[in-house]
Amino acid sequence: LSNEVCEQLRCPKSKRSQRNYDLPSLGAVVEYAGAMEEPPLDEDPVSASKTGWNEGIIRNFENEPGDQHEADFLNMITRYMDLYAQPTPNCYSYRTVYLAHALNHVIRTRNLVISNNRKMELAASKGLPSDDLVESTRDQGFVRPTVLILCPFKKDAFDIVQRLERLVFGGGKGSVWNRDRFNTEFKSENPPEFKTRMPEEFKELLTGNNDDCFRVGIALSKKVLKLYEAFDKSDIILCSPLGLRMILDGEAGKESHLISNIQIAVIDKADIMLQQNWEHLTIIFSHMHTQPSKIDTDISRVRQCYIDGQAKFYCQLLLFSRYRHELFSALMLEHSLNFQGLVMQNASCEGTLDK
């Protein structure tokens, strides 16, 4: 991106061109334009078959149960736009959509690296690779992780891994490394029986494995889903805000290189994180996309945008919450610098104080 475009993306969102929509399931949303001119969001609904995803992911995704939000989420997330949305309670199609999107992104990234490795090996066998070839094979960041998923509890992480497994392997049993260890640490016990009638939201929140300090590195290779992979060898970092802050060594951020080239960042259930400690998230995002002090990768394979400090403009930020809050809006407006633009849902709130 040119310096002029970067400055344009850093400007307050109020200075960008805006488009307002009334979408079928999400209702009123506002789109803040990025550096690219995007088609209107209210065009024909997008199906999984039209996303350009890997065929296996499309097939497995279509076997997953959906809900009324699925088409709208597919339309926005697959465009790589930033998104702040408030899904209806107990509607989790957004989670399946962003996981399929992240999986496809990881697969495309790894396939590109493998293809370029072959090109470089072939060129090296014939002599020194040309400068043009070296520049065209810049396909990596400073470290391997490209997807960061933040969720509040271990029970949410367990559900995310279960969905990942189904999206990768479908109905069949695939090879999952450290599955037993993961089930032992993350699976919830049978929920207790409540003697009095409690709201479903209460039951969902307070039952299950509510441990809020965890972190798991996930790597995807051919026909294998690797759990508990070393973070610098992982494709996806799945953790709670507290767990990630501990990796970063608190406010010092000595291990911030692990999130220096995140390309998809997801905040799942931000409303629960607000009840934990919102400061964890502000510290995490203050360290994200900072230039690492040391690297172990081949600098000739690092994308020029990362070397130029433009990683933040190539990162998709997704935030999901059950309700609106000024801290969620503030985080999105400050850290959403994606050149594809930003979409924010303006869900209507029906109060009861006037009744």
Image (spheres, helix red, strand yellow):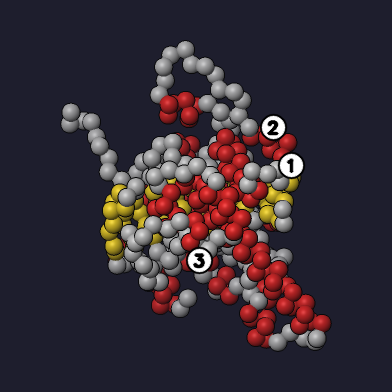
Image position, residue 152 (x, y; %): 52, 39
Q: Is residue 292 above or below residue 73?
A: below
Q: Percent position (x, y) of residue 229?
A: 71, 49
Left or right of 334? Residue 296 is right
How far apart, in angstroms, are the residues tagged by discs 1 and 2? 10 Å
Name the residue that disc number 2 marks. Answer: 184
So how many labels did they put on this image?
Answer: 3
Q: Which residue is mark 3?
A: 314
Determine the secondary structure under disc 3. helix
View extreme (right): residue: 125
Is disc 1 placed on a helix, strand or loop?
loop
The image position of residue 151, as x and y in percent, is: 53, 42
* Residue at position x 56%, y 28% in the image: 208
Q: Identify the image quadrant of residue 137.
A: bottom right
Q: Residue furthest top?
A: 195
Residue 348 visible in the snapshot: yes
Q: Residue at 31% of width from left, 46% of height from top?
A: 347
- CA gap, disc 1 to disc 3? 32 Å
- What amino acid does circle 3 point to? Tyr
170 or 191, which lies in front? 170
Q: Specify whether 318 is left or right of 149.
A: left
| Helix, strand or loop status at disc 2 | helix
Cα distance between the residues tagged 2 and 3: 37 Å
Q: Position of residue 316 (x, y in %)?
A: 48, 59
Up-down relation of residue 68 to residue 14 (above or below): above
Outermost residue, left direction?
354
Q: Residue at x 80, y 86 (%)?
A: 126
Find residue 178 and name its label: 1
Closest to the camera, between mark 1 and mark 3, is 1
